Amino acid sequence: LKEIYRKGMLEGEAPDLPVSFEDIREAAWENMSEEGRAYVHGGSGGEETFERNKDFSKWRIVPRMLRGVAERDLSVEFLGEEYDWPLLVTPLGVQTLLHDDAEHATARAASDLNVPFILSSLSSTPMEEVAEELGDTPKWFQFYWSSNHDIAKSFLDRAEAAGYDAIVLTVDAPTLGWRERLVARGYYPFMAGEGVANYFSDPEFRAALDETPEEDPSAAVDYFLDIFGDSSLQWDDLEFVFENTDLPVIIKGVLHPEDARLAIEHGAAAVDVSTHGGRQVDGSISAIEALPAIVEEVDGEVPVFFDSGVRRAKDAFKALALGADSVFLGRPWAYGLAMAGERGVRHVLENFLAELDLTMGLAGCASVDEVDRSTLKHETELE
Ligand code: FNR
């Protein structure tokens, strides 16, 4: 990591790709279709939450000096494993809209840097192929519940058989949000046959069709839309997931402390505080606003993860300082993927980790454990 900023800052060797989030997004934008832009940008409603998610400025880092930060350790431990970094690649569906190499590219870049990878149910590549690409890199499978339980069970079985280490159950999408950019274009990626590879390759999904998805793709898409998600679910229904997998289950999309408590009571191995990137309830509390109360409620019983709005290392630092065990990164690498495929994702992840390492050192933290509440002040504490 030191090599990266040394090159950029001390040797005058500029990278051949843009560095800031804004410049990367601009470069990505040029390579994307209008539908792709609408899908990835895609906050719900008037994008109030999408915008507010990115505001971490009420929390200020208070750096400490002369703390011996020459050797910094970014590793973290949770769910019985040690990880090199407090960072995971968030699940993000339909990556063909970003780049033709889609999840293959993202997985290779993550694997190069040993950044754990969470694969979306809505991936453009079957989960087994992505698992192979990832090799020994930690991999989790994000699970969207199908109302057809044979298919839901089949997804859990396939994830376990393919070597995924955990299930990330997303609970904030009983249905997809009101995404104006998509509504206005009358565009839904799945109708164009994007993001359905896990379903089309699933034996139970195929068994439920009269003709194969290859023979009649539009009937297969119709069936997919029919069984995708289940808005009738309640907490007690989670029993089905725990009964059908031995893997730890992480509940993604929690914003209320009582939901974090319910998740733990129902057997969750961890929770993820998330607004789904501002794509679900417009006007909702932002993820960073929700985090402190959830950390307080969970009180160390299970790990707490965080995503939504993280653009730069300072954002991840603040989430870690407020008690998150690790952070899921989303749009920054997604735009890296659209900008330059595998190389773009690697560039974003590498720069992000280098900046986090530097931020920790400058703030006086030699390890992630030291990134705690004492390193922050809320603006109301400043007077
Ligand atoms: C997502 N997200 C998401 N989450 C999930 O559980 N399953 C999914 O298939 C997807 N798909 C998806 C697609 C796109 C294009 C985006 C931007 C997001 C949500 C994702 O995991 C994460 O919560 C957000 O990306 C966090 O917000 P930021 O930091 O990217 O703004």
Image (spheres, rainbow, N blue to C red):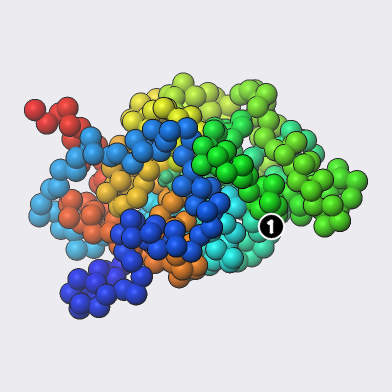
Q: In the rendered image of this protein, does residue 48 appear above or below residue 369?
A: above
Instruction: Give the number of callouts.
Output: 1
Respond yes or no on whether mark 1 lies under 8 Å from ligand 1. no
Quadrant containing the C terminus in the rendered view = top left
Q: Position of residue 23 (x, y in %)?
A: 33, 60
* Left or right of residue 41, residue 147 in this image: right
* Left or right of residue 145, residue 285 in this image: left
Q: Nearer the viewer, residue 111 or 340?
A: 340
Q: Position of residue 371 (x, y in %)?
A: 26, 45
- Name the kind of residue labelled 1 in the image: Pro
Q: Residue at x 10, y 55 (%)?
A: 66
What residue is shown with label 1? 126
Q: Residue at x 48, y 35 (%)?
A: 44
Q: Nearer the viewer, residue 213 or 289?
A: 213
Which image quadrant for residue 52?
top left
Q: Position of residue 354 (x, y in %)?
A: 30, 62
* Left or right of residue 63, residue 78 in this image: right
Q: Position of residue 367 (x, y in %)?
A: 28, 53
* Left or right of residue 237, residue 178 in this image: left
Q: In the rendered image of this protein, does residue 83 appear above or below residue 169?
A: below
Q: Residue at x 63, y 48 (%)?
A: 189
- Mark 1 lies on a secondary structure that is loop
Q: Residue at x 51, y 48 (%)?
A: 38
Asked if residue 175 can be seen in this view, the reply is: yes
Which image quadrant for residue 237?
top right
